[in-house]
């Protein structure tokens, strides 16, 4: 358990990338993020809370997202996360880096 | 940014954890709802299981924010301490340098804090204002009785107004008759200031009622000196100028009303702002202080005062336009000390700057040496930010140690500054290294550390790859840029030291100019004291004269007294006193204003002999010269100005003494001429002066001048006793050496001189250390180059010359920049110091020469070492 509790089918650091991407279009609360990831991955990706919340805190610490309390769709108090400008920049950077890494692995595998 | 976010998380960690818990519970509830929708049997339990361990998640979150970071800090600190321990000499040099810089800054800060930043010690100080008249844009300290009455009648935001004026009187009832300083005020003063008495009570309105017994409040120092702090004094009666007053209370030493900071009163008596016999005029005669009502803004009180002033202008059209200004109490006194203190503060800041430059140089030198270590750590996976933080941590540790040592040093330094005893700066004696002072100093040190550390970190991690392979090559190419910066820093350091040395030189020149001023007579062993006869007791001029005749005779018989004379205004006291005079034979001008004028003083025969003055023409006074003989003695300046240098003895003059017109004044015969002396302070030119015998006009306020071989401290009680022998109720005050009185400005500049001199010396030492360090380092780095040169046949002397030439360039560059600043700051200093009215090139040249020679000596040592390099040994080792 602990920080490494990210799903083993994810490369390290990828969860943050996916969360940032999830927040790109709209602000979401934790459950919303998990649901979006599940739906977007075709039910393949289920992120545990014990991995999600530390990841969100890391994003907060780096100033890539901000959090504010608001009302959820069924009127519960929920914490919504919004991506910041530097978060968007980070997403672009990570996206490029990820593509490079995957491409690299791909090339080696196909060689 | 990240640090601030971490900090705010840490500060709000309890709330953050609660929020996390709530957030995760919300998450669970949403999942439960979803599961229910999907028809799960145990939606609640399943959602719980999916959530996992909330406490553990909270731990993980805390880890994100705090632990790894704190861990790294602890590791950095440990590592840094290990590194510093490995080179103790280096660490000690750095810490000592920083300690000196911090010590200087903190000592000065302690004074600045006490004088400029501490509020007056009164409970209500923030709401107290001093009221002043504004005439033609200039603010006067004093106001008139009608102003006070009008402000009181108006009320409003200015809820209370009290008045004060000072006087002095003979006090009997204590150990010896004492001249006491009186403050006439009213009971409002005590309620406005709010200071509680240390014994007895403060006056109330009841004490001011007509017919109430007169009361007096004592100062703590008078209570201690005259009554041995005996509480039994309360309720007893004191005689003040012959009238009886009941002692009701004693105020603590912090109560210095009406001045905010320095003591002006020994006794407080109650006296209303008006008196039936006073003329109803808006002449400024008293100080006034007001209390702003709680919660009311000063601006509103000022608006109301403006309206009051306008109404008064209408009522007293003859006085013209007189405004009223409310000044915050604390602001009224600081203005005078501010420029001088800020000057010294600036100088100590410059010293700290030099310290920083030195530390940067020392660290730069070392971090080039440490390149191999840093490269190894980079190779093992330490990021650039990690290495930078390591270096900043090291710098922070050095500065923290040095800063702490400096603050301890300052405890001594602060006392040393206070011991200089500059009388002109109020509250200086309160200077101490307290918590706010230490906090300010440490803030300065930490900022310096962060700047220095960033520079070092930037240098160490800049320039691309941190590879092990280029560690050697780096010395040549990468090092060159940083060596340039290093040398620029040394040049800057030399420049800053030049500024401080020139400043100290200018002040020294001022002090010497003041010491050179010849007062015109020998001031050695001249003691002076003042006394004021009560006019009720010595009504006639003849009785006043008689008193002083007897006093002169009594004083002459006191053992240790060689000569003793009487004068109304002794040399050393400034101020203007120039009544109109008329040279007999000249036509009477149309108005008194067109008369010639001269400084007029009254003196007896012994005054001249005590000062050692002799007649240049005719004779000086004798005991036979009385007011009735209508004689006068003049100085040479008088003869030159008013008699065109012609013969003076036998000429007749009239002097329009106060209260008489020139036509009423009797003609007086000039019987002699004496040589010019400094009649006022040593800074003022000798005015044309006429001396008249004592008794020519009111002679109640006079001064004694005594020449003695003994210590002044020993003579003071003897002189007091002699006065008491003549009149047991008569006191003397203001005992002081006449030389000190005339040159009292010297003690004022002494503070600047000693402090700036010390700071200049420290700067010089630091500049030498800096130059030595850089040269030594350059030599170490260039050992190979020098060895090759030597192997190729260049002589050791040429190597020395080469290195010294580089040093000379550094010094020249420093002088160019520093010289310009020094010239500018010298102009600033001149405005603060008497005696220098032009830039003295010799001072600058001397300061420059001292600096250049010392710094070159600092270069010479490593240069000589370089020339002794054995080329064979060095080249073989490569």
Image (cartoon, coloured by chain):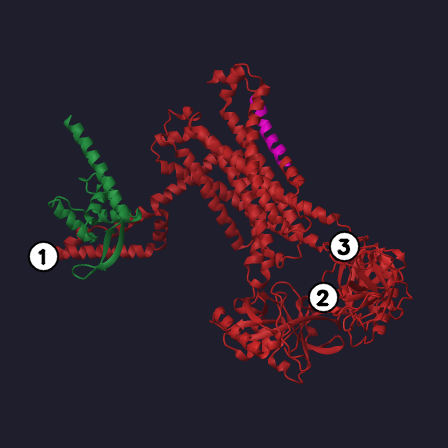
Chain colours: A green, B red
Q: CA distance from mark 1 to mark 3?
A: 103 Å
Badge 3 is on which residue? B739
Q: Nearer the viewer, residue B132 or B310?
A: B310
Task: Tell us which disc is closer to us: 1 or 2.
Answer: 2
Q: Residues within 10 Å of mark 1 (few under 14, many from 20)?
A: few
Could you say which disc has been placed on residue B247 in the image?
A: none
Q: Residue at x 59, y 74 (%)?
A: B162
Image height of B870 relative to B484, above or below: above
Q: CA distance from mark 2 to mark 3?
A: 27 Å
Badge 1 is on which residue? B37
Please give the range of residues in magenta: B850-866
Tell me where residue B511 appears, x and y as whole percent: 69, 48
Which callout, 1 or 2, points at the residue further toward the start of the chain? 1
Badge 2 is on which residue? B225
Image height of B279 relative to B230, above or below: below
**Could you tell me which chain the residue with mark 3 belongs to?**
B
Q: Residue at x 12, y 55 (%)?
A: B34
- Residue B776, by quadrant, is top right
Q: CA distance from mark 1 to mark 2?
A: 94 Å
Q: Residues within 10 Å of mark 2 (few under 14, many from 20)?
A: few
Q: Residue at x 37, y 43 (%)?
A: B71
Q: Nearer the viewer, residue B222 or B649?
A: B649
Q: Is residue B53 magenta?
A: no
């Amino acid at each position: 358990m602990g920080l490494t509790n990210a799903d083993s089918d994810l490369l390290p650091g990828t969860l943050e990338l996916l969360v940032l991407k999830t927040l790109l279009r709209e602000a979401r609360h934790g459950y919303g993020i998990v649901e979006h990831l599940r739906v977007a991955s075709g039910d393949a990706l289920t992120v545990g809370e014990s991995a999600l919340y530390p990841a969100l805190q890391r994003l907060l610490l780096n100033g890539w997202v901000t959090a504010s309390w608001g009302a959820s769709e069924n009127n519960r108090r929920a914490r919504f996360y919004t991506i910041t400008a530097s978060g968007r920049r980070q997403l672009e950077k990570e996206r490029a880096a990820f593509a490079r890494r995957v491409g690299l692995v791909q090339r080696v595998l196909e060689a | 940014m990240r640090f601030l976010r971490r900090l705010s998380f840490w500060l709000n960690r309890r709330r953050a954890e609660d929020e996390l818990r709530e957030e995760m519970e919300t998450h669970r509830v949403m999942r439960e709802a979803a599961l229910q929708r999907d028809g799960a049997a145990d939606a609640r339990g399943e959602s719980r299981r999916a959530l996992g361990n909330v406490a553990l998640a909270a731990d993980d979150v805390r880890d994100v924010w705090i632990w790894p970071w704190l861990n790294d800090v602890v590791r950095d600190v440990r590592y840094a301490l290990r590194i510093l321990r490995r080179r103790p000499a280096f660490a000690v040099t750095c810490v000592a340098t920083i300690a000196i810089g911090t010590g200087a800054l903190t000592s000065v800060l302690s004074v600045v804090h006490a004088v400029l930043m501490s509020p007056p010690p009164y409970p209500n100080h923030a709401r107290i204002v001093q009221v002043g008249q504004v005439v033609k844009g200039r603010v006067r300290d004093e106001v008139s009785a009608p102003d006070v009455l009008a402000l009181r009648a108006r009320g409003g935001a200015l809820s209370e107004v009290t008045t004060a004026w000072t006087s002095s009187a003979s006090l009997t009832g204590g150990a010896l008759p004492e001249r006491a300083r009186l403050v006439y005020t009213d009971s409002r003063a005590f309620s406005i200031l709010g200071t509680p008495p240390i014994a007895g009570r403060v006056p109330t309105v009841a004490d001011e009622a007509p017919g109430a017994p007169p009361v007096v409040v004592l100062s703590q120092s008078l209570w201690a000196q005259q009554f041995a702090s005996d509480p039994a004094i309360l309720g007893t009666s004191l005689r003040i100028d012959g009238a009886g007053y009941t002692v009701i209370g004693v105020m603590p030493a912090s109560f210095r009303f009406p001045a905010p900071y320095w003591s002006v009163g020994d006794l407080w008596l109650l006296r209303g702002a008006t008196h039936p016999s006073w003329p109803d005029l808006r002449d400024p005669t008293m100080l006034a202080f007001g209390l702003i009502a709680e919660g009311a803004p000063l601006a509103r009180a000022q608006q109301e005062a403006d309206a009051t002033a306008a109404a008064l202008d209408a009522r007293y059209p003859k006085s013209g336009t007189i405004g009223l200004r409310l000044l915050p109490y604390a602001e009224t006194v600081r203005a005078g000390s501010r420029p001088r203190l800020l000057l010294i503060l600036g100088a100590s800041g410059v010293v700290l700057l030099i310290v920083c430059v030195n530390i940067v140089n020392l660290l730069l030198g070392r971090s080039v040496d440490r390149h191999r270590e840093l490269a190894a750590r980079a190779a093992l996976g330490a990021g650039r930010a990690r290495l930078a933080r390591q270096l900043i941590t090291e710098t922070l540790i050095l500065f923290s140690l040095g800063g702490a040592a400096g603050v301890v040093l300052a405890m001594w330094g602060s006392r040393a500054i206070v011991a200089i005893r500059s009388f002109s700066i109020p509250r200086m004696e309160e200077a101490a290294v307290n918590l706010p002072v230490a906090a300010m100093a440490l803030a300065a040190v930490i900022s310096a550390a962060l700047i220095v550390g960033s520079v070092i970190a930037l240098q160490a991690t800049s320039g691309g790859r941190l590879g092990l392979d280029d560690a050697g090559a780096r010395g040549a190419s990468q090092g060159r840029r940083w060596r340039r910066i290093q040398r620029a820093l040394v040049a800057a350091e030399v420049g800053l030291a030049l500024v401080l040395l020139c400043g100290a030189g200018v002040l020294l020149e001022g002090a010497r100019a003041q010491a050179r001023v010849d007062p015109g007579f020998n001031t050695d062993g001249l003691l002076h004291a003042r006394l004021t006869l009560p006019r009720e007791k010595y009504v006639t001029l003849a009785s006043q004269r008689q008193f002083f005749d007897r006093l002169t005779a009594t004083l002459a018989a006191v053992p240790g007294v060689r000569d003793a004379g009487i004068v109304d205004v002794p040399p050393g006291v400034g101020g203007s006193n120039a009544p109109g005079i008329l040279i007999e034979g000249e036509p009477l001008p149309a108005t008194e204003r067109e008369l010639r004028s001269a400084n007029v003083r009254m003196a007896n025969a012994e005054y001249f002999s005590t000062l050692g003055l002799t007649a240049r023409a005719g004779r000086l006074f004798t005991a036979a010269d009385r007011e009735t003989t209508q004689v006068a003695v003049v100085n040479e300046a008088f003869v030159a100005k008013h008699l065109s240098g012609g013969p003076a003895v036998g000429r007749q003059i009239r002097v329009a003494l106060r209260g008489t017109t020139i036509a009423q004044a009797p003609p007086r015969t000039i019987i002699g001429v004496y040589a010019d002396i400094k009649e006022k302070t040593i800074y003022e030119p000798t005015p044309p002066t006429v001396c008249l015998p004592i008794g020519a006009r009111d002679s109640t306020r006079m001064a004694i001048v005594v020449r003695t071989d003994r210590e002044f401290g020993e003579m003071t009680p003897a002189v007091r006793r002699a006065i008491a022998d003549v009149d047991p109720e008569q006191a003397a005050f203001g005992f002081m050496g006449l030389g000190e009185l005339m040159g009292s400005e010297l003690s004022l500049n002494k503070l600047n001189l000693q402090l700036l001199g010390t700071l200049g010396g420290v700067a010089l030492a630091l500049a030498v250390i800096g130059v030595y360090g850089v040269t030594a380092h350059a030599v170490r780095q260039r050992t190979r180059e020098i060895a090759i040169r030597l192997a190729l046949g260049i002589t050791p002397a040429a190597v020395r010359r080469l290195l010294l030439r580089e040093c000379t360039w550094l010094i020249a560059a420093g002088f160019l920049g520093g010289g310009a600043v020094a010239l500018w700051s010298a102009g600033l200093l001149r405005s603060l110091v008497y005696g220098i009215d032009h830039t003295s090139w010799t001072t600058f040249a001397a300061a420059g020469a001292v600096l250049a020679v010392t710094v070159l000596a600092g270069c010479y040592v490593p240069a000589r070492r370089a020339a002794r390099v054995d080329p064979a040994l060095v080249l073989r080792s490569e």
